[in-house]
Image (cartoon, helix red, strand yellow):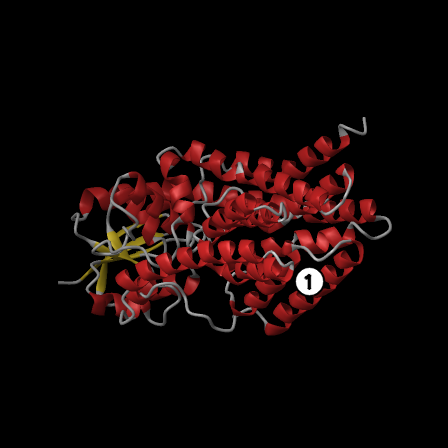
Amino acid sequence: MHRLLPWALLLIALLPSAWFAFAARELPQLGAHSDDSHYYNAALSLAEGRGYRATSVPGEPRLTRFPPGLPAYLAPFVHNRTLLSLLLWLLAPCSLALVFFWGRQQGLDHPVAALLCLPIGAFPAFVQVSANVLPDLLAFALVLATVYIVEQDSRAATLLGALAAAAAYLTNDAVLPGLFAVALYLAFRRRYFQSALYAAVLVLTSVAWLTFVRAHADSSAEGLARWYLGGPPTLHLSNVALDFRILVLVLLLAAVWRSSQAHQLSAYGCLAIAHAAGLLFADSTHNLLILLPLPIAAIATLPLHQFLLGAAYLSCLPSLPAALADLERHRAFHPVRSQAYFWIEANTPAAARFLATNDALLHAVTRRHGFSPRNLPDPTSLALRTGLDYLLATPLDPASYQASVKADPFYETVYEHDGVLIKRRRP
């Protein structure tokens, strides 16, 4: 019975993400996030042999906004959404298995290492990204693989860990500060050759990607095109409250200190500190996923840790019904959106260009190009100046954007059904 307990805990940890992924097996929520349909389009571009391109943008330039790791991972199965959703969810058991092995590496026994997986598996961000075309879970798994492998203390393992780190960077470039901190950790441990080897692989990878970006990005792009053509976002203080970011860093430092009382500071501790500091300049709170194992491992050293970790798991479960309800909202809208897309295919020229919040999904279905308003002020006026032919608004779009489209006098209504509005530029 004691031998089966860790496996039972791992299965329980997987239940929330498995439930959500099964409910989302046809990916009805594709396009619900700001970036997921762009990753999907990039995977389509790779699968069709057109290279790594922003295919929804007029002219279909090279895609420099996101690194290519996730699209490359999804490309072989991108034409089958059921297989695609399975491929996304498989990252969840891989991640939790790596958390378990890392816990064992830190000296925890099998049941306690498995207990680490409970709150992570039920964490709302973990559950959400297990069934969405977003890079967070793939980057999480690759970071876990990196810190686990480099602790093996051999040149071959360090090279393999460096390759995992390079893949993590090419999946989510926000993890770069933490990945470089691993090289400093290796040097601190007097593993100088391994540190140089690891750093060399990571530097070569980052230089290669940044060279690609500089060769194809257009830093002079303005208006609607700026987000697409300007390359990766530059570092700036996050829009999320600074007090919250500092609190995260302080809590992480406390967790690392607590862990160091029982174990020597690990590669993961160094990576997490650097990554937490980098979050001060990050836009996405999903990057917090990478930090989760450290404070949870610190909790595992406390008295009554079984109760605390079990309570953390149960406290996350109430968020699942809300996620499933949102999934159903997108599923219910799917026929309405499909009908509008069918109309666009039948009634607009192939060269038509649109303003649409979900421009990448629009292109994936209809092959029409365009831009998203991206919260820009007065987007319909920008659409007119950019020469866009059509405006598209749906009930899932922000209310301010819907109102702007309805009120615009320079475009005339050509389609209106179930809250979907399409307007064409007047002659």
The answer to whether one can see residue 118 in this image is no
In the image, 255 versus 389, the foreground residue is: 255
Screen quadrant of the C terminus? bottom left
Screen quadrant of the N terminus? top right
In the displayed structure, 145 sits above or below 180; it is above
- In the rendered structure, the answer to whether residue 298 lies left or right of residue 304 reads left
The residue that appears at 51% across and 58% down in the rendered structure is 196
In the image, 300 versus 242, the foreground residue is: 300
Which of the 4 quarters of the picture holds residue 379?
bottom left
Q: Amino acid at mark 1?
A: Leu
Which of the 4 quarters of the picture holds residue 291?
bottom right
> Which residue is tagged 1?
252
SS at mark 1 in the image:
helix
Q: Position of residue 319 (x, y in %)?
A: 64, 48
Q: Position of residue 331 (x, y in %)?
A: 46, 40
Which residue of the protein is positioned furthest toward the left in this rendering?
427
Which residue of the protein is positioned furthest toward the top in this rendering?
1
- In the rendered structure, the answer to whether residue 125 lies left or right of residue 199 reads right
Q: Position of residue 58 (x, y in %)?
A: 22, 56
For label 1, the crowd category at 10 Å Cα-Cα, with few meaning under 14, some 14 to 19 and many 20 or more, is many
Q: Position of residue 155 (x, y in %)?
A: 55, 47
The residue that appears at 59% across and 49% down in the rendered structure is 150
The answer to whether one can see residue 226 in this image is yes
- In the rendered structure, the answer to whether residue 14 lies left or right of residue 207 reads right
The residue that appears at 58% across and 62% down in the rendered structure is 184
The residue that appears at 75% across and 37% down in the rendered structure is 110
- In the rendered structure, the answer to whether residue 378 lies left or right of residue 201 reads left
